[in-house]
Each structure stands twice: as structure tokens, then as C-alpha cells.
Image: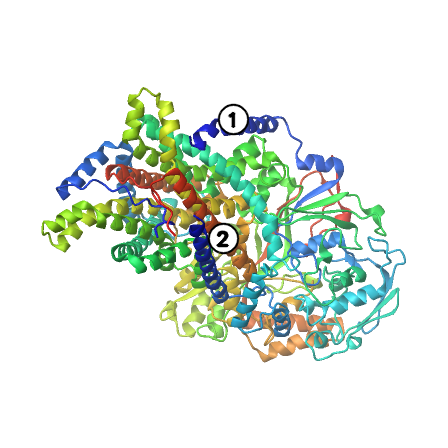
Amino acid sequence: MSPIPTKFPTFLAHLTAAAALLFASACTKRETAVESGNRTQTLHVGNQSEPPDLDPHTNNSHVVSLIHDALFEGLVRLAADGTTILPGVAERWDISADGRTYTFHLRANATWSNGDPVTADDFLAAFRRFLEPKLGCEGANTVFSLLNARDFLEGRVKDFAAVGIKAPDPRTVVFTLGFRAPYFLSVLADAHLRPLHQPSLDKFNGRTTRGGKWTEPGQLISNGPFVLTEWKPNAVLVVTKNPRYWDAARVRLNAIRYYPVEDAAVEERMFRAGQLHATFSLPQAKIDAYASQRAPELRATPVLRTNFVTFSTQRPPFNDVRVRRAFALALDRERLAATTLKGRGDAAFSYVRPGVGGYSFPPFHRHDAAEAKKLLAEAGFPGGAGFPALDYTVGSRNQDDLLVAQALQQMWQQTLGVKVGIASVEFKVWLDLLRTKTFALTADTWSMGINDPVDMLALGVTGDPNNDAGWSHAPYDAAYAAIAASSDEPARRAAIAECERLIADQVPYVPVFFSVQNHLVHSSVVGWQDSAVHRIDWTAISLKP
Amino acid sequence: MLRFISSRLLQSLFALYLVITATFFMVRFVPGGPFTAEKAVTPEILRNLEAHYGLNKPLWQQYLDYLGSLCRGDLGPSFKYPNRTVNEIIADKVPVSAELGAISLAVALTLGISLGTLAAVRRNTWIDYVASSFGMIGISIPTFVVGPLLVLGLAIYAGWFNASGWYGPADRVLPSLVLGIAYAAPISRLTRGGLLEILNQDFIRTARAKGASEFRVVSRHALRGGLLPVVSWLGPAVAGILTGSFVIETIFQIPGIGREFVNSAFNRDYTLVLGTVILYAVLIMALNLAVDIAQAWMNPKVRLEA
Amino acid sequence: MTSASPVPATAVPEPVEKGNSLWHDAWLRLRKNKLAVFGMVALAIISVACLFGPLLSRYGYEEQNLELGATGPGSAHWLGTDTLGRDLLVRLLFGGRISLAVGLAATFVALTIGVVYGAVAGFFGGKLDAVMMRTVDIMYSMPFPIFVILLMVLFGRNIILLFVAIGAVEWLTMARIVRGQVMSIKKMEFIEAARSLGLGRRRIIFRHILPNVLGPIIVYTTLTIPGVMLLEAFLSFLGLGVQPPMSSWGVLIKDGAEKMEEFPWLLVFPGTLFSLTLFSLNFLGDGLRDALDVRSSKD
């Protein structure tokens, strides 16, 4: 009398019944999430990956920034175009003539979601926490323009009173900068620099520690257009309209549901099945299909991300500038953009994307196979003879990135006659190779955290932690220092142009393409505007049924 | 019996200690750390970060600290998810994977045992070939192909299901079907093999000679012994099934622990890697013990030896 | 001692007087199994095609034609091209070499470690056996996918390492099977009989023990290869497969699965060939199991 055969029929019957029930319920026409969302003004968004935490200071990924834009409001906020600065908690501000003192006047009706007023001291406390040495906030370098901020973070200044931020009264915040930084307002609009509700921080000892429970639903007190109501890790994060937001009348959506869908193909299928109003990604293979069949839903937004090749400039053969130039000239970017990239990127002829912060650059890096061959021969490798075998290191798991790498590899091999392999390594291993400079040349990228060329030009400065090329060039360091030291805009413009020219001349980095973000927005979504800085104004969005 | 179990528990504890130690040092030798981020921070910031989690202490000290907190049942904080502990993450996600696993296992057993029995009873006929071929689908086509195909057909074109997600009962159908088919294959093969062996034995011939119907012979007499190989296979397999599947959980956007097994390694979330390894090891040891006891009960020939 | 081993050490083929007839009988039985024969023939054709096919093609596996891009099957490219304009047929056959090589090499590693380890444990028995088998039990409780991933991460996407890493995972079951078989055969009457007849130790081992252990080994080997090939595909899914521009079936299928709606041929051809190979290997393995009358469970 064994139980398996005897119990089996009943078990089978249960299973059959359950299956039949599911099948029946499945066959009736279902209302999709998008349809019900349109009815209830609930936006369903695919948000790429799980937010590690909602602490604005210790997290700087796009994923978290997009949620913070719904939850918190800083002194100023970014308009949907990504460049215009609008009043936030501050209703107005004054900038001193030398561009080094910013005075913000807070509105009286700004409140926290529990009714407490938002005060100047909340901003002061937030900046204090952002620069707290014990917390080690990764994005803190964005406010290094603030007087003594860097020294405080790195322990050389112990007294926070020396840092250039003051709250003379509950409705005034004054910033003093260490140098002129025309981008300072856009830094303040950044997702990091939001006020924090001090009593709830204190409840969890959150001022000096990471990972407090104050970011959980029910505990998180915020001051933005939405409040956090639900957070199921790896499933969904829900924010709902905040009735206490000072400008609540502007907010049309009742709720936003963020789904951390890591796989772009999965996200696209969810969009097609009517589960998502919007995605933030689209597999490259799908671009053509959407462009021809569902063009209004396809958004292609140029973003502030440059994809470039980094040479290890301290080691042969790339310590020779002629070899670096030869490799740069061998690349045919237009051909790449027209074939392999196909809508994923624009050919890059400068290091910083033209237009960033209002600056533009002449196109460097034109394809010139003859010159490339000549330079390589001058460097002692005529026709690639005697050139050491080396690998082009790729740290991305993305199949599309690997395709680009293979196309570049062929261009080098065919134009220069050199043998270049591809070493595709796991992402953090790749980062380790970058930091230890144990690579020959690698596929690199940079997403700009500040909408200003300095953000990316810093990568060329001797000793900068992100100077992956290990490049050290005194004229460049001088030119970069001149940007901060410039007392007026023409001087600043000239210094930036000099930096860009030196990079084109010395080629520690070879720009390949500027990313274009392809993604999907459902036709029922009104007011969705993309910008180069990958931020969304959730308050501008509504849904038409 | 009691002596057997207690001795096995002691052995398991020792094995667990070895597994923990090996994993602890192995993850530390992998290049890159939990705070190796795309944008490098200044050395000062990195030092502060590491100090916060005690990563600046000597490795042996960290190892002892970890063992100490482990004895208190504390698996430590997650590096990747600062406001969650490893205990919370496991408690949060294991039930999801276990539910998916249980349903898939039911599908797999139903499918696998029926196909295997059919194939064994009609050995070397076209029924055997069809049943065996069908059972083979699961181990011949990767789940990352079957999954998207089913989603395209049943969710996107037919519109019966969500493309992915884990909300209502209907969302359980596709993932457990894909996972179930994958596990049905070995079950059907083991059932077929096990049954063939039993069906040749004397007591089956006796039963047949007595005029018992073929169905009765198989269901009453043969299956008990014939499923022995399936049971011994189930031990380690159930641990795998219950701890989720990276592919299925990715394709169907399921908040289970299976994805953490892989992602924790990619994130260098040392404590979470250890947490998942411990979870898996404990499960497998417990299930192996259960299998041994079950086998002894199903087959008196196997004696429990300590 | 044997408690944790799921291999019942009971069923062993009847001793056969003439060693040859065992294999002869097995061959006759195998030939009657249509699926196994189909598997054998299919495997032979696929292996030959993968080995020699790329030599006959006018395209190289890494030869790009960016302007051509992905095109469907046609007269220039029989199975079409991928998004870089590379000939799919050549990449498929070349990938087959890699995948089959990974399967064979990793299985060989598993086989070598497993047979030696299992035989030593089974032959000497006693304390040594207890320690060795306990070690296997401990290793069984490790989540091997994690270790393979850690290894791949640690040492890079090195194809040799892939063999070794996967082989190091798969040897455990082999060790258990061999040990169980050796132990039970050692005790069998026909071995005693052979000894009392004055046969040499060598003759006993090669004529009596080995043939009886060989059956399960062959069967398990045939069944390990598909598992290894699937693992290779899984690693490719994680982006830890072979280095581009090299191809393997796992890489091709992963790539094809991502583009199955736009460029279905990129999935259909690699998927079919991969599945056909795995089908064939499994059928052959099952057929061998029946033919060699290996009645104990797979693991």
C-alpha cells in the first residue's frame, strides 16, 4: 500500500481542475494593466533594475533618480527638456555678480508629506549628511564646487561650519562656491540634493549610517509630488499622489508603478502585452520593427553618454601617441553608425557630446585609413608587422555592445593589419582591470552626471580616479584647471575647447559614438518628454483612456 | 534510527562549515569588490565605505566575525541593498521560488511519471518513442528558448496571460509550465528505467499470472519500486527546484531567490553570496537525509547505516 | 557508509562466461533500438559536418559584411547571415566544433577524475573510502552554478577553463557510480571463482571487473555530454560563454533567442541542430543503458 499510486488520482484531479479554472479565466478577454491604468490614472513604468535603496545620498543610479524625481523636490527642479531650471522648494534665488554666491528663498507652503514645514535647516542637514565622511556617498564629487566641501569629505576640514552652505533663517539657504561653476543650478536639481526629513532620519540613526529603515514604505517622509506606498523588492515599487505637495494641483497621475525589469527583451514583451505604459530600453533588433509599424510609440532620445575606446597610455604600444592616433583614424564611425549601431548611437567626432552645457566643438577624428597606416609605420609597425598581439577588452554582457566591439576589431585588423583579439570579461572584473590599468585598450563609456563638459573632461586629469587611460599631460591639467579658474564665460569656453583639442591631439580616449536611448511610450500617455539627462517630469504626465 | 540521524546531522554541520569557509575565501579572491562602481570614487570615500562594513579589517578577522554572527543566526547586511539584511532577502524571496518550484514539480512529476510509465509499459513501440521524444524536449531545448516562445504565443498573440510578472494565479501558469517541462525529462527517463527493471522481476510475473490487469500490476506493484530512482534523484533536484531558476525568474520577472544566486556573485555582495550558498547547502543536506529515510522505507533492502 | 549514495549497489549484470559475447549481445540489442540507431547516425553526420564543413565554405566564421547585415537563407548564404553579415552556416558548424568539444572535453575530465576517484574508493574501501565519499557528499551540497560563475569571472572567458570547470562539477556522480560498481563486483562470487581458478589479477580486473564497470560508465558519459552542452548554453545566456567572434551553439542560440521575431533563422537553425544533437545523445545513452543492461539508476 504505497501512497503514491493511491493518492495520485486525487492529486491529478485537483491539478486538472485548477488548470481548467485557470484556462477558463484566461480565455475571457482581460483588461490589461495599461487599460485599467488609463482608467485610474496609474502609470506603469518599466524601470530597468531594482533600486538598491531609496536613500538619495548613497544611490546615484538612473533607476533611483527617476523614483526620487517623484518622491522628493530640491531647491530647484529640472524642466522636462532637461536644461531649463524651474523653482522647486525655493521660489526664487539670487546669484552674485562673481557667480560664487547663490541665495535661495524658500516658499512658505512647502511641507513634508506628514505636514511638517520644509525648512532651510532640512537642506543644511541633507548637505551635511551628503558630505559625511562616514557615509562615503559615491556622488559627493558633484558638489565639490562648494567651498571646502571636498576637504570636509576627505577629513581635512573637521568643522562643517567652514563648508559653503548656510541657513541664516528658516527660509533662506546661502551657498558659497570655491570657484565659478555655471552648472551649479543643474547640480542642485540633481536627484542627490534633496532635503531629508530630520526626525525620521533620527529615528533610525540615519544621519551617519547607511541602510536605515527610514526608506521603507510607511517610514519614508518625502516632500515631492508623490509618496512611497508600496515596495516589493524585484516586483514593483508604487508611489501615489501626495495631497500635501505644495503644487498638488499640477499633478495629474494618481499613482506610478515602477517595475524593475532587468532584461530589455522581457520589458519589450511586457509592453506589447499591455502591461507597461513605458519602458526605458529597447533591444536593438526591435528598433526597425517599431520604427516601421508602431512609430509613434518609439522614442529615440540622444543622451549624455559617450562610448569611447580607452588606451592604457602608460604601457607599450599605446604609450606612443602615433599608435593611438593610428587606431583612432582607422575607425570609420559613419559606417559603424549606419550598419552595426543602426539607431543605437550617433557617430562621435568629439569627446564631449556637442551641445552639453551649451558648448560645441569642431568635429575631430575623421576616418583616414592612409594617414592611420602611415602613423603606424612611423611608430615602427609598417603594415602592422611586429605589432604585439593584444586584446580589446569589453566589460559588457550586452550582446549589442559585443557586436560593436567585433565591428571595431575588424576595422583595426583590416585597416592597420594588426591582430586584435576580443577579451570579454565580467563587468566588475573589467572595472578592476581599469583601476589597476592592466589592459591594452578597452571599450569604455561615460554617462555625464553634470550637464557640463567638466564632468567628462575630468577623466583626462592626472590622478583622477576615473582617468582610466592613466594619462598624464601637463598642458591638459593646466587647461582643465583654467576652466574652474575662469572668471568669465569666454575664458571658460576657451579653456574647455583647449581640453577637447588636447584630447583629440593626444588621443588617450577615442570617441566612437554617442548613445541614443531607444525606448517605448504608449500612445495613451500624454505629456511624456524625454531629455538628454534621462530624467522625467512625472507631474507633466497624464493618461487619456 | 535516532543514532543514524544525529550522526548525519553532525556530519552535515561539519560539511556546512567547510562549504562556508570555501565560499567565504573564494568570493574574496574574485576581482572587484561590492563598492567597485562604474564611476570610481576617491580613495578617501572608498576607505570610509569599507570601514563602514568592516571590510578594512584583516580577512581572518572578517572571517571570524562572520562565523560569530552566523552562530547568532545573523547572515549580515547586504552590500548591494543597504537597507535590507540577507536574512530579510532570503525570507522575502524563498517563498516565491518555493511556490514556483512546488507547482513546477507537480507538473514535472505528473508529466514525467505518466510519460515514463507509458514508455516502459509499451517498450520499443511507437508509443515509447513518442513518449520518450516528448520527455526529451525538456532537456534538449534550453529554457531561455522555450520561455520566450511560450510568452510570444500564449501571452502576446493569444493574449491569455501576462507576458511576465508574479501577481495573480494566472501568472503561475507559464513559468511553472516551462520549468515543469524541463524537469519532466529526467523524471520520465528515470521512471522508464526503474519500471523496466521491476517489470522483469518475479513478483510482477506472479501478479500477472494471477490475472491482475496490467494497470493494476503497474500501479499497485511496479510503481513503488520503479519510482525508487526518481526518489533518489528528487533529493538534490528538489533543492535546485526550490531555490529557483535564474533563467525562469529573469524571463518571467519573478521576485524569487534564483536570481540572487547569480546576481549576488555579479554584484560581489559577499554576504548574500554566502547566504544563498548556505541556504542551498542546508536544503540539499536535509533533502538527502529525507531521501535516505524514504528509500529505506520504500525498499527494505537498503539499510540505514550511520 | 553507503547511506548517502543513491546508487543501489545491488544490480549488476549477470557474469558472462565469454567477455566478447557481452559486447556482442549489447550491440545486437542496440541495433534493435530504432531511436538509438537514429541517434548514432545523426551524431555521426553532425560530427563530420562540424569537423569538415567549415573547410569547404568560402566564408570565415568571423568574416563580416556590415553593409549586408542580417539576411535570410538564400543561395549566397544557405542559412542566412547574422547582424554583422556573417555566414550562419559556417558559424553554426564552427560553433558545433566548440560545443561538441566542450561537451567531450568536460566529460572526459569528469570521467577521468570520477573513474579514478571512484575506483580507488571502491577498491580499497574502509576508512579511505569513508573519507573520500564524505568529501563527495560535501561537494554535492555546493551550489555548483555559483562556483562555475565565480570561476568564469575569476579566470575570464577561457575555453580551456570552461572544460575544466564544468568537468570538475560533473565528476561527482561518476565517482559514486564507479565506486558502487567496483565495490559490488569485488564481492561477487564469479570473481572469487575466477581467483580460485588461479586466474591472474590482471585478467580478473580486465576481463571481469572492467567490462562490468564499463557499461555504466559509457551510459553515464553519453548522458553527461548533453548536460554539459546545456550548461554551456546557460553560461552563454549569462554572457559568460566563449569569447567573440568565436561562436558556439550556446552563443548562437542566445543571440537567436533575442532576435527570434526579427531574424527567426538565427534561432531556428542553431536551435534545431542543438536539440537534434542532444536528442541523439540522450537516445543513444538510453539505448546503451538498455543494451548493456545497466539496471541501476542514472545517479
Q: Nearer the viewer, residue C158 or C201?
A: C201
Image mark for residue A330? none
Q: Chain of mark 2?
A: B
Q: Secondary structure at mark 2?
A: helix
Q: Position of residue B60 (x, y in %)?
A: 51, 71
Can see residue A287? Answer: no
Amino acid carrying mark 2 in the image? Val
The answer for how far apart the CA atoms under marks 2 and 1 are is: 34 Å
Residue A114 placement, left or right of C216? right
Residue C148 placement, left or right of B74? left
| Disc 2 packing (10 Å; few <14; some 14–19; many ≥20) | some
Q: Nearer the viewer, residue B225 or A221?
A: B225
Q: Nearer the viewer, residue B27 or A280?
A: B27
Which residue is rendered at x = 80% and y = 62% of the image? A198
Q: Chain of mark 1?
A: A
Considering every residue shown, the one lying at the far front of the view is B2
Which residue is rendered at x = 52% and y = 41% of the image? B101
| Disc 1 packing (10 Å; few <14; some 14–19; many ≥20) | few
Q: Which residue is mark 1?
A: A13
Which residue is rendered at x = 43% and y = 37% of the image? B184
Q: Which residue is mark 2?
A: B282
Task: Verify CB contact (< 8 Å) between mark 2 and mark 1.
Answer: no
Considering every residue shown, the one lying at the far left of the view is C198
Q: Position of residue C175 (x, y in %)?
A: 32, 53
Residue C190 sits above or below residue B59 on the image: above
